[in-house]
Image: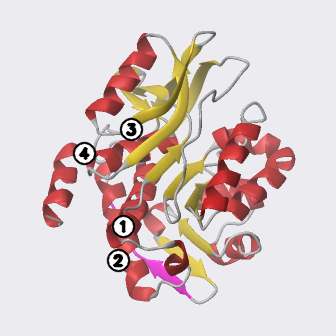
Amino acid sequence: MQHIYAVGETILDIIFRDHQPRTAKPGGSSFNASITLGRLDAPITFISEMGNDRVGDLILDFMNENGVDANYLSRYENGQSAIALAFLNEKSDAEYQFYKDYPHQRLNVEFPEFKKDDLLVFGSFYALNPGIRPRVKELLVKARKAGVTIMYDPNFRSTHAPERTDLLSVIKENMGFATIVRASDEDLINIFDVDNPDEAWEHVRPHCSILIYTANADGVYLRTDDLDLQLAVERIEPISTIGAGDTFNAGILYGLFRNGYTNREIRSLGKFQWEELINAAIRFSREVCLSYDNYLPLEFAEKVKQKYK
């Protein structure tokens, strides 16, 4: 059986609307995808680090409650678990202020023994940060050698745009490790200064043979050497968009897992298979936007599980 892995940061999101705190949720891009997959009873392992403190205990308890394997977590003493203040704007998008206190030695944990056709998701600034990049690259090299299907979500926001020139080569290297690049229109504007899927594909194509380009209410686009698809997205009034892209990623991974697609098969999927995968991921993302959760709501996860019983 395939196993799913995610690597990324853990963080506690304290969510504000109209200058008032509304809720606090454990978060982090790959973490959010992991929780969704755990709620769907998929075999998911999260590889990360956090402080040996009360915030870390809270996050670890949350992982255990949601069926996420925590055997590859580093709990450090010299530092504190990360916290983010997430201020929701009029579009329900978040603007962040971070508080991080990491130790000198990062991701001090043994990596798992990957198997061929396992699945791995990674991304965000966590995969670019010079302080942890050597360990992340070590993990990616090991996964690729094992024949793992790798999804990369750059999640590259405007706050990092001033560092783009210095980070561009690392972003391209990450794309080169990936079987699938799933990037938003905002990511690719900030990375390549392009604002449409065709130009984005021209930049991604030399590094990765599959691009899933998400453009919020304007739809989702798939580009491969053989396919050129656009799928519509229902317009909604979101409560919070935090975790929408992460849960979309989880939807793609869950579909790949449910269908048992191998790495080789993924590279040659047809129109019908991709439409099925992407439409399911769109539904996952929609549900997240209708709540303050950063992950698929439990009620919807139960409905999905019942469908496959």
Residue 250: say if magenta: no
The amino acid on which the numbered mark 3 sits, given as a three-letter code, is Asp
Q: Position of residue 54 (x, y in %)?
A: 42, 11
Pointer 4: residues within 10 angstroms few (<14), some, or many (20+)? some
Q: Earlier in the sequence, mark 4 or mark 3?
A: 3
Is residue 3 toward the left or the right of residue 152 in the image? left
Q: Earlier in the sequence, mark 4 or mark 2?
A: 2
Give the distance between the C-alpha atoms of the residues marked 2 and 3, in whole angstroms.
28 Å
**Which of label 2 and label 1 is nearer to you?**
1
Q: Position of residue 41 (x, y in %)?
A: 26, 50
Give the distance between the C-alpha atoms of the residues marked 4 and 3, in whole angstroms.
19 Å
Kindly state the secondary structure of the residue where label 1 is placed. Answer: helix
Is the stretch drawn in magenta largely helix, strand or loop? loop
Image quarter where the N terminus lies is bottom left
The amino acid on which the numbered mark 4 sits, given as a three-letter code, is Pro
Pointer 2: residues within 10 angstroms few (<14), some, or many (20+)? few
Q: Earlier in the sequence, mark 4 or mark 1?
A: 1
Check residue 297 in the rendering and tell me which mark sits there, or answer none.
4
Residue named by callout 1: 255
Residue named by callout 3: 69
The amino acid on which the numbered mark 1 sits, given as a three-letter code, is Gly
Residue named by callout 2: 276
Q: Earlier in the sequence, mark 2 or mark 1?
A: 1
Q: Which residues are magenta?
A: 227-236
User: What residue is drawn where x is 72% and y is 75%?
Assistant: 205
Image quarter where the C terminus lies is bottom left
User: What residue is drawn where x is 48% and y is 70%?
Assistant: 220
Give the distance between the C-alpha atoms of the residues marked 4 and 1, in whole angstroms.
18 Å
In the displayed structure, 274 sits above or below 284; it is below
The amino acid on which the numbered mark 2 sits, given as a three-letter code, is Glu
Is residue 201 toward the left or the right of residue 279 in the image? right
